[in-house]
Image (tube, rainbow, N blue to C red):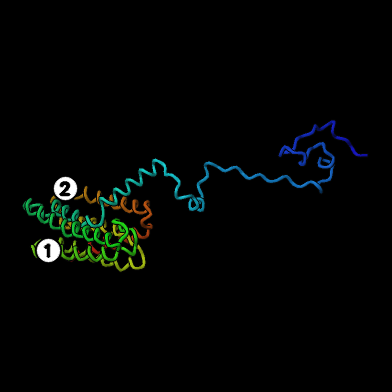
Amino acid sequence: MPIDTSSYYPEVPSPDGGNDGYSLNRREGGLFGSSQNNPEPPEREPLPRHDAPERESEKKNRSKDDPESSGERFITVCSNLLSWILVPLLMPVYGLILAFGLSILDVAPIGMRITFTLIATGINVVIPMILVVLLKRMGLVDDLGLNGRKERLIPYIISIVALVGTSWLMWAKGAPLWLSLFFAGGALGGLINMLINFRWKISAHAAGVAGVVALLIRIAKDGSPEPELFFWLITSILLAGLLGSARVWLGRHTVWQVLAGYAVGFGCVFLLTMIS
């Protein structure tokens, strides 16, 4: 004789609120009933943990149209601003200004320093920028930032020629050999970058700022008369790190492309300037 347990166990509703679940007091699905005809209750999906880190696959699958947070927008704006302030075309000019102010060249007349700085700016910044704008109008480059690897060939050639011309000018006008070789090192680094760029998008920004760091180390080797040299050396190293991080944040380069740019720019300028 089956035992009726309904008086001991009140009916408990099924987990999904329906009548096809199981209850303790039902003979067909309770403690004493058969479970062959009763399917297992559906498994519930675990609730997402808000403190769990976002998976890499989920990051890749996020829509590009997702709005950035205010913090991300701020970092993006700062990264773009830093990329334009430390654009490779300006690195020769920055290096020349630092050389005039931190080395034995600080005894040169102010008029001479301004003249050479303006000449270097015209050769390495103004003329290349005009030519890049013309290339854009001709449809040979897509944007002035030269973010595409394949559109960098002609601008690289222009920059290399400009640096070689500036190096010759400094040598012809009696500047210290290490200053002339600073521009020659930039030209050599540009040539190496151009050859690598045929297969891999190495960072020209990283190469340029690393060349300035190498120049300051070369000036320190002679014993700079200016106590501010150490400050500018540390500042240039910090800016180099920030610039590399900015290029990676903007998606222009990978970490390895930035590191390769550092190595090429620093190595070429350091080795050539140490000749003198």
x and y percentages locating residue 22 in the rendered image: 77, 40
x and y percentages locating residue 208 in the rendered image: 26, 58
At label 2, the amino acid type is Pro
x and y percentages locating residue 34 in the rendered image: 84, 45
> Which residue is rendered at x = 29% and y = 66% of the image?
153
Quadrant of the frame with the C terminus: bottom left
Residue 169's mark?
Answer: 1
Res 220 visible: no
**Hey, which quadrant is residue 200 in on the image?**
bottom left
**Hey, which quadrant is residue 115 in on the image?**
bottom left
* Residue 41 position (above or below residue 158): above
Report helix, strand or loop for mark 1. Answer: helix
From the viewer's perspective, is 105 left or right of 86?
left
* Residue 153 position (above or below residue 46): below
Report helix, strand or loop for mark 2. Answer: loop
Res 138 visible: yes
> Which residue is rendered at x = 47% and y = 50% of the image?
63
x and y percentages locating residue 195 in the rendered image: 30, 68
Residue found at the very far front of the displayed protein: 138
**Hey, which quadrant is residue 26 in on the image?**
top right
Q: Which residue is mark 2?
A: 227
At label 1, the amino acid type is Leu
| Dot 2 or dot 1, earlier in sequence | 1
